[in-house]
Image (cartoon, rainbow, N blue to C red):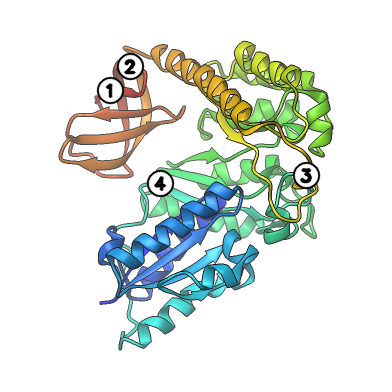
Amino acid sequence: MLSFAVRNFGCRANQAEAFAWAEEFRERGLSLEADWTRSDIVVVNSCALTGRAERDVRKFIRAVNRENPGTRIVVTGCYGERAAGEVAGLPGVVTVLPQSAKPGLAAAVMALGAEKGLDERPAGREGSLRARAFLKIQDGCDHRCAYCIIPSVRGRSRSVRPETLAASVRDLAGRGFREIVLAGIHISSYGEDLELRGSLSGLLGELAGAAGPARLRLSSLDPRRTDAALMAQIAGDRRICPHFHLSLQHASGRVLASMGRPVDPGSYESLMEGLSRLAPEAALGADVMVGFPGETESDFGELRDLVDRSPLTYAHVFSYSPRPGTPAAARPRPAPAVVTERAKALRRAAAMKDYRFRRRFIGRELEAVVISRSAAGVEVLTGNSIRVLAPYSLAPEGESIRVAIRRVLPRRTEGEIVA
């Protein structure tokens, strides 16, 4: 049987696509191979969000060709869309599929399999790419932030019909998945492009009802689209994981306006305080960017102060990366050494917030899902996004369990499965 591996880079929308491809590949008769060095075909879902992301893709492709020279590498995703010729020239790459060809990716992979004499046959649904299910609810983005290349390579916002998503959620829950991650490029815009206009709030109500024993986890929310009603809904529904991630980017009104995201930074604080008040045990995270063109020390100070005084429990800190064709790419930027120091300072602050948040749960029992197993034990993910290492357990991957938090270290949380 022909084997495949999927290597994903970038956002949760990519993760959801990779999850769906893996399911279809197996149904068509391919075998999922966790070790890409032994796989006949490697599918790379690439990212172009930053220059570093593109470098990581190139490094991985070269490693595959070096360690497994007989494999055939299929590349798709944002980097493949932005620079198809460049990607096609990398060693081992046999085809580069544009974003528009993603729905036919399984057929393209099967065509490669046919060259090796594979007979297409049902393979059943045993096993999965992930212990949690990922479901893409929308793609693309109608916003044009000055730093972002994604609208150029993904296109305008396009929502999946709610009845299609509800059917998918029922199917995934019926197959035993106990957590379903709802992903997209800009899920806060969900439904605005549909003939029968919808909303993220309306969709969540429908999907929560379809999920049965499974819980829903949200990917990144746009704070500009998160009003009081949506806050109350996501914080008050136990069928939605208490984990909320916000695309903040900055706290300086001047920088936000230059980014093409004009907003009163005070509204960010009100939003975070509101979510923290409504769901005090929830993980509350944010994307923040340092080094944007024109960022002064005063601007950075506003961002650092916001992170320090906010109820955030963690932050993903990114250094600005100029993307070809975006309005900000040609603007003068702070010196690299300055950007590096600013990023380090924010990451230190974020790490301390994460540590303090996890310590709050020592001795507590939390709902969780088993996400991986090894000879050393199991790793579980709590509803409020704490990864916990526990001793060996018979609980299989994907199982809903309760875990008691026993010990919290700066980079590690240890616990015990109790139910």
Residue to which mark 2 is pinned: 408
Q: What residue type is labelled 1?
A: Glu
Which-is-in-front pick, marks 4 and 2? 2
Q: Which of the two marks, 4 or 3, is nearer to us in this view?
A: 3
Q: Tell me, yes or no, whether the two marked residues, 4 and 1, touch with CB atoms within 8 Å.
A: no
Report the Cα–Cα distance between label 1 and label 3. 43 Å
Q: Residue at x 34, y 57 (%)?
A: 128
Q: Which of 240 and 129 is in front in this view?
A: 129
Callout 4: few (<14), some (14-19), or many (20+) C-alpha neighbours within 10 Å?
Answer: many
Residue hosting label 3: 328
Question: Are the residues at dot 2 and dot 1 in contact (C-beta closer than 8 Å)?
Answer: yes
Rendered image quadrant of residue 43: bottom left
Above or below for 250 versus 211:
above
Depth check, mark 2 against mark 3: the one in front is 3
Q: What residue type is labelled 4?
A: Arg
Residue 295 found in image quarter:
top right
Drawn side of residue 251 relative to residue 166, left or right? right
Q: Name the residue under label 4.
A: 132
Q: Which of marks 4 and 1 is nearer the N terminus?
A: 4
Comes first in the chain, label 2 or label 1 = 2
Query: Residue 262's spot in the image, x, y percent?
Result: 84, 32
Badges 4 and 2: C-beta atoms under 8 Å apart? no
Residue type marked 3: Ala
| Placement of 151 over or under 309, stated as above or below | below
Q: Where is residue 92? Give x, y as percent.
A: 40, 73
Distance (Cα) linking label 4 and label 2: 24 Å
Q: Percent position (x, y) of residue 35?
A: 27, 59
Res 414 label: 1
